[in-house]
Image (cartoon, rainbow, N blue to C red):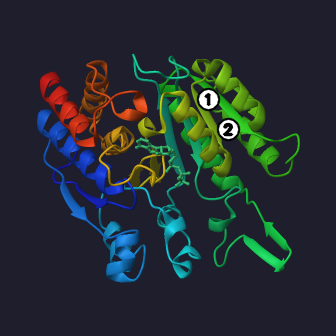
């Protein structure tokens, strides 16, 4: 890892101001423990707080500054709660994914030993195409792919392009090569033949470049059943935007809790760490949130930046803290965010 990385810190809404600082604290301790240079953290406004201070959920100063940074941590946003004029705009993470062409949303789901996971042996990664597909709000150059020609008719379009499918397929295969060499393509080619059939066909073409990877494919509906029944058999799943969003909530929960489901959104030049879960308004402000997903997302960012030792240490620290019995409520424990974070830092210092 090069010296003096500069990473943005965007707290976001709901539980964001609780879990993002926890991630910063854990990343700092892991970097110190492996003897890496400290990160320079750059706080930037986003979300409801930014609407109050800057009149925008994603102020220009934030986007301009991110452009000059090596990566960033983005807390969840609760855009449904924004005033109507802000709700009508692309939400902050959708905007950032589109603006920086963060085409690969990598969402691992791995159960923690000793926790009440629905699928205890689950260890897979959902590779979600992040720039087009059925999320029509971000598939167009100008305007949105959702529209109402009359007051009684709403239409959404999906977009599937060869270059976008090829690059996400390659990303997924590269990951499968480093893991258990199994890749599953998720689609709905029996009904959405032209769009998801195209996705399937191109992923199959790219498969020819990776003869060592075993490839199969499932319809999205059947996939949910296979994951619930025998999720531990799967390794890497590649799919379009909306299917990936839905599937990764399922895989996160099967692994124990949405609160442990991390992600990064990456291009070849940049990466944004972002928990797979939302802003959890039902528990926000009470110090109850599980910071694991945000911490693990930060570890994925360090890994992406080339600091595997710090990333691995964070993963071991998280697992040691949970194995030692310190758990947040979503994993059946009583620890709050601060207590759990302190236990992870202690584990990291003990393991280093
Ligand atoms: P979005 O549409 O942004 O995904 P949502 O409201 O559909 O948001 P979440 O905010 O992810 O979904 O919340 C779903 C459930 O998971 C809620 O009950 C929430 O409390 C729980 N949850 C989400 N994140 C965490 C966390 N970090 N720790 C504990 N529970 C969480």
Residue name at image x 50 percent, y 40 percent: 107
Q: Which residue is mark 2?
A: 206
For the C terminus, give its image quadrant: top left
Q: Which residue is mark 1?
A: 210
Looking at the rendered structure, the secondary structure element under dot 2 is helix
Q: For residue 155, which quarter of the picture?
A: bottom right
In this rendering, would 303 be left or right of 182?
Answer: left
In this rendering, would 254 be left or right of 148?
Answer: left
Looking at the rendered structure, the secondary structure element under dot 1 is loop
x and y, in percent, of residue 340 in the image: 25, 35
x and y, in percent, of residue 100 in the image: 47, 64
Foreground residue among 92 and 312:
92
Foreground residue among 255 and 43:
255
Residue name at image x 69 percent, y 55 percent: 133
Foreground residue among 5 and 272:
272
x and y, in percent, of residue 314 in the image: 27, 33
Question: Alpha carbon of mark 2 to alpha carbon of mark 1: how far?
Answer: 7 Å
């Amino acid at each position: 890892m090069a010296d003096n990385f500069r990473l943005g810190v965007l707290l976001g809404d709901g539980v964001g101001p609780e879990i993002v600082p926890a991630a910063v604290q854990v990343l700092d301790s892991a970097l110190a423990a492996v003897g890496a240079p400290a990160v320079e953290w750059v706080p930037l406004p986003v979300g409801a707080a930014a609407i109050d201070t800057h009149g925008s959920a994603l102020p220009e100063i934030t986007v301009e500054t991110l452009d000059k940074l090596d990566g960033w941590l983005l807390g969840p946003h609760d855009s449904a709660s924004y005033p109507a004029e802000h709700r009508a705009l692309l939400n902050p993470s959708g905007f950032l994914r589109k603006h920086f062409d963060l085409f690969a949303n990598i969402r691992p789901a791995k159960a923690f030993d000793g926790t009440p996971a629905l699928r205890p042996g689950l260890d897979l990664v959902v590779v979600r195409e992040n720039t087009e597909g059925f999320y029509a709000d971000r598939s167009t150059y100008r305007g949105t792919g959702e529209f109402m020609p009359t007051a009684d008719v709403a239409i959404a379009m999906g977009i599937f392009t060869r270059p976008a499918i090829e690059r996400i397929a390659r990303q997924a295969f590269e990951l499968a090569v480093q893991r258990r060499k199994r890749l599953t393509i998720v689609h709905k080619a029996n009904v959405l033949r032209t769009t998801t059939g195209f996705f399937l066909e191109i992923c199959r073409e790219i498969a020819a470049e990776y003869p060592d990877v075993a490839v199969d494919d499932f319809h999205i509906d059947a996939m949910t059943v296979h994951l619930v029944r025998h999720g531990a058999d799967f390794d890497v799943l590649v799919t379009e935007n909306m299917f990936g969003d839905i599937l990764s909530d399922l895989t996160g929960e099967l692994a124990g809790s949405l609160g442990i489901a991390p992600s990064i959104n990456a291009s070849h030049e940049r990466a944004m760490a972002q928990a797979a879960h939302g802003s959890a308004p039902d528990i926000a402000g009470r110090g109850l949130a599980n910071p694991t997903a945000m911490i693990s997302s930060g570890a994925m960012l360090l890994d992406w930046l080339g600091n595997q030792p710090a990333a691995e240490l964070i993963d071991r620290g998280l697992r040691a803290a949970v194995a030692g019995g310190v758990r947040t409520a979503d994993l059946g424990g009583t620890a709050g965010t601060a207590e759990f974070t302190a236990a992870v830092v202690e584990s990291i210092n003990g393991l280093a």
